Structure formats: C-alpha cells, structure tokens
C-alpha cells in the first residue's frame, strides 16, 4: 500500500505505525459527528425511533452542536492506539510478504488485513470502551450519565469504579469486528488500488475512488459485528457477543444488524477516503525526502 516503486526499499517499520496513526487521527476529526450518531442509533432498543434525522435533531435539541463531538478525545486516543497498530502491522506484513514472495493475492490481502485487525483490537480496546461510553452518555437521563471529562478521566474512573478488567470488556467482539473491518477495508482498498492503477494512473483520483469502494465494502460487512460490539461494551454487566446477537435477532429482527447504515457510511466512507489519502501523502513525502 502506498506510492512504492518496485526498486524502492520499504518504509521503515516504525514509520508505518506513525503514519498510520497520524492518518487516522486526522480523518476522525472530520467524521466524529457521524460516528456519534451511528452509536446512538445502535443503542436504541426495539421501541426506539430509528431515523437518522430524529437522532440528529434530538442531539441538537438536547446537547447542542458540541454534542456531536462528545467522545472526541477518546476517538483520537483510539486512532492513536488501534489505527496506529492496525495500519502499521498491515503495511509491515504486506512489505515483508512482497519482498519474500511477491505481490500478495486478494485472498492473502484479506488474511493480512484480518491478522492486523485482530492484533490491533486488543491494543485499542480500552479506548474503544471509553469511546462507546462517552458517545452514549448523552442519551441517558441526567442522573444516570457518567459525565467523563475526557478519555483519560474515563479510563481512570473505569479502573477505579469497575476494575481494570472492564477496559477489556467486549475484547472478543472488538477483535471479531476488527478482523472483519480490516479484512474488508485494507484488503479491498489494496485490491481496488491495484486494479484501478493502470486505468487512472497514480494520484489523488486513484486514492479517492479506491477509498470509496473500500468504505462501502467495509460498512456493509462490518455493521452486524459493530452493533454487537457497541452493545456489549455499553452494557452495565458483562454479556458475550453471542448472547447479544441472539437477543437482537429475536427481539428486533435481523435487519437491525444493519441499523445506522447511513451514518456508518457517512463516517466510514469519508474516513476511509481521508485516512488513505493522508497515508498515501505521508508515504509520498517520505520518499521525496529520502530519494
């Protein structure tokens, strides 16, 4: 992944992690409102109003414009941990495989993406728990809100009030989602980029279209595991992902697994576009400065 000529040396492994994290953090600043709306919709029970506009208007009415950015510190911390790890691991494994065996096939790209996502999920799970708690807080009655001040306040209070193990609540669900997301997102982006390169040539247009394809693929594939993960991590008591999945299908219907598709793609599409464009530019800058 990235603007690499066949005779170029791979970008140093540690820089893969730095560039990945910086790209994710830059992108999340733009799409945080869509992620918050998606989370609120996923936490609605069978009697909740499922429309995007009702959710958006409710946030505006009760919390103001700033309500859309609740949990931004946790979102940034998540990108600094989870996205740094997943993109860094993916690019490092991809570079190693390419240098040893040649360009990976599409199935191999999916496998590399899933491995990267699964490993990164455990690194980012504490930030994930804090993010879900903070973005969900505004939907609760005032006397039930946790009112975390920022991600570090959230993490310290979770540890002191509920125990450190709570930071890894839903880790298996997070890992499942991460493997699906990364296999779909990183694998489909890399494949789309490879297929479109002869037609579009190198540049922003190539990165943009490949990212749109990747974002749509990822949103469709990841929503069912995402809604299960969200509910597990927001639960007051520990429940496993299979209990939550069965309950959703039984009580709310199978289509509920794709609730929040519009805000999910409103987040996933632009985030994928921005993240990969930023990543490609960081990679290109590295080669301009070192060649």
Image: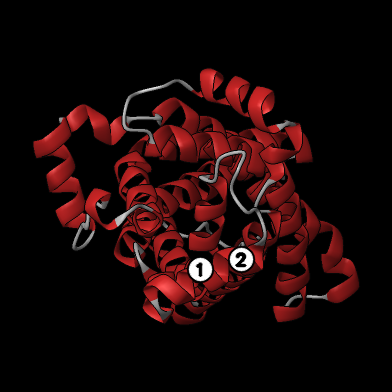
Residue drawn at point x = 45 percent, y = 51 percent: 88
Q: Please tell me whether residue 82 is drawn above or below residue 254 in the rendered image.
A: below
* Point 62% across, 29% down: residue: 248
Does residue 83 appear to the left or right of 3 in the view shown?
left
Q: CA distance from mark 2 to mark 1?
A: 6 Å
Q: Residue at x 44, y 57 (%)?
A: 16
- 10 Å crowding of disc 2: few (<14), some (14-19), many (20+): few
Q: Please indicate, yes or no, whether residue 236 appears anywhere in the rendered image.
A: yes
In the picture of the structure, the residue carrying the numbered disc 2 is: 54
Left or right placement of residue 77 versus residue 115 in this view: left
Q: Are marks 2 and 1 in contact (CB under 8 Å)?
A: yes
Residue 180 in picture, x, y percent from top left: 63, 37
Q: Is residue 97 above or below residue 35?
A: above
Question: Residue 201, percent across and down?
Answer: 82, 75
Q: Residue 266 location, x and y as percent? A: 65, 66
Asked if one can make out residue 109 in the rendered structure from this viewpoint, the answer is no
Residue found 62% across the figure and 54% down from its top: 49
Where residue 157 sits in the image (x, y, percent)?
13, 45
Of 259 and 202, the residue lying toward us: 259
Q: How many marks?
A: 2
Q: Say which element carries label 1.
A: helix
**205 to 187, vertically: above or below:** below
- What residue sits right under mark 1 in the picture? 58
Task: Identify which residue, 204 or 285, lies in the foreground.
Answer: 204
The disc placed on residue 283 is none
Q: Secondary structure at mark 2?
A: helix
Q: Nearer the viewer, residue 157 or 11?
A: 157
Rate crowding at label 1 as few (under 14), some (14 to 19) or many (20 or more) other CA atoms within 10 Å: few
Of residues 267 and 21, the one nearer the viewer is 267
């Amino acid at each position: 992944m990235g603007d690499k000529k066949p005779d170029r040396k791979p970008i140093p492994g540690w820089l893969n992690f730095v560039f990945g994290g910086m790209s994710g953090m830059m992108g999340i600043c733009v799409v945080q409102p869509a992620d918050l709306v998606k989370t609120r919709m996923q936490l609605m029970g069978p009697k909740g109003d499922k429309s995007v506009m009702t959710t958006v208007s409710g946030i505006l009415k009760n919390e103001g414009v700033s309500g859309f950015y609740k949990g931004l510190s946790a979102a940034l911390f998540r990108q600094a941990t989870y996205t740094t790890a997943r993109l860094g691991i993916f690019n490092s494994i991809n570079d190693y495989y390419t240098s040893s065996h040649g360009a990976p096939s599409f199935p191999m790209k999916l496998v590399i993406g899933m491995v990267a996502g699964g490993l990164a999920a455990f690194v980012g799970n504490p930030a994930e728990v804090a993010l879900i708690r903070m973005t969900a807080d505004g939907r609760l009655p005032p006397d039930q809100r946790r009112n975390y001040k920022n991600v570090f306040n959230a993490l310290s209070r979770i540890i002191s009030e509920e125990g450190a193990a709570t930071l890894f609540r839903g880790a298996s669900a997070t890992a499942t989602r991460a493997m699906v997301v990364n296999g779909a997102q990183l694998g489909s982006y890399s494949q789309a980029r490879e297929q479109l390169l002869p037609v579009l040539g190198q540049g922003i247009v190539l990165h943009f279209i490949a990212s749109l394809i990747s974002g749509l693929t990822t949103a469709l594939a990841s929503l069912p595991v995402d809604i299960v993960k969200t509910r597990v991590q927001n639960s007051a008591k520990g429940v496993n992902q299979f209990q939550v999945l069965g309950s959703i299908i039984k009580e709310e219907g199978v289509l509920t697994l794709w609730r929040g598709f519009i805000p999910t793609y409103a987040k996933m599409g632009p985030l994928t576009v921005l993240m990969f464009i930023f990543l490609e530019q960081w990679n290109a800058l590295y080669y301009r400065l070192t060649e």
